[in-house]
Image: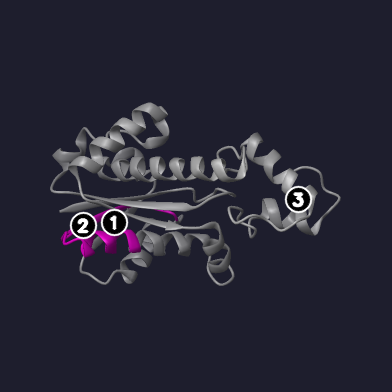
Amino acid sequence: MIAGVDEAGKGSVLGPLVVAAVGAPDWATVRELGRRDSKGLTPRRREALYDEIIAALPFALVERTAAAIDTARRHESMNTIVAGAHAAALEGLFAGGHSIRVAYLDACDVREGRYATTVGRQLGAPCTVMASHRADSTLPVVASASIVAKVTRDRAIEALADEFGTIGSGYPSDPVTRRYIDGLLEGRGPLPSLVRASWRTVSDRRLAPGQTTLV
């Protein structure tokens, strides 16, 4: 069996990081299901493919909350945190009784081989790990994982919006998210649990109270 692993929410200032691992008996099985990276699909098409993928293939999900990311970043880089979550997602497939021969990852490091080694060292089961940039656009099994991760995170953001109000996509480039963060920092109260306080878009402004826009 092969597997693909990808994440959603790595660069978000709000909400969780979600990593999905999807297994498949062969390439033909995922060639149609995961033929495109999730970012190139409409939300409706992503949802439809998500339903097809999880109905047909084994998968595992790992979530790292904003608080967990802030804690981990005291002693780890974000790439290391993501690598650990990639390994944990693969472990989830193994724990489900699936024997993975080769795992393909979307590399979160400028050096693809180094990233594959970092993830492979954290696996407790024998598995060849291969990482490449833009694997979510070139490898159907990784594209399938990208779809599962993206839909799962989008649903998590919707749930957070129900609890905390209009928060946008959670990414610093989103004007809605930026306005939400601005409002929180202007209020100078405790930050809610969905905020990654270690992000520079938050921490720099907390240290510079006169600043009026996010960077």
Left or right: residue 185 versus residue 106 is right
The image quarter in which residue 97 lies? bottom left
Which x, y percent locates residue 15? 54, 50
Q: Residue 83 lies in magenta, yes or no? A: no
Amino acid type at circle 3 is Leu
Amino acid type at circle 2 is Val
Helix, strand or loop status at disc 2:
strand
Amino acid type at circle 1 is Met
210 vs 100: above or below: above
Residue to which mark 3 is pinned: 185
Left or right: residue 110 versus residue 49 is right
Residue to which mark 2 is pinned: 102
Circle 3 residues within 10 Å: few <14, some 14–19, many ≥20: some
CA separation, marks 1 and 2?
Answer: 7 Å
Marked residue nearer the N-terminal end (3 or 2): 2
Split into 4 quadrants, where in the image is the N terminus? bottom left
What residue lies at 64% left-to-right and 54% top-to-bottom? Answer: 192
Picture disc at residue 130 = 1
CA separation, marks 3 and 1?
Answer: 42 Å
Left or right: residue 207 versus residue 102 is right
Helix, strand or loop status at disc 3:
helix
Q: Are marks 1 and 2 in contact (CB under 8 Å)?
A: yes
Left or right: residue 182 versus residue 58 is right
Which x, y percent locates residue 179? 70, 39
Q: Closer to the observer: label 1 or label 2?
A: 2
Q: Nearer the viewer, residue 18 or 214?
A: 18
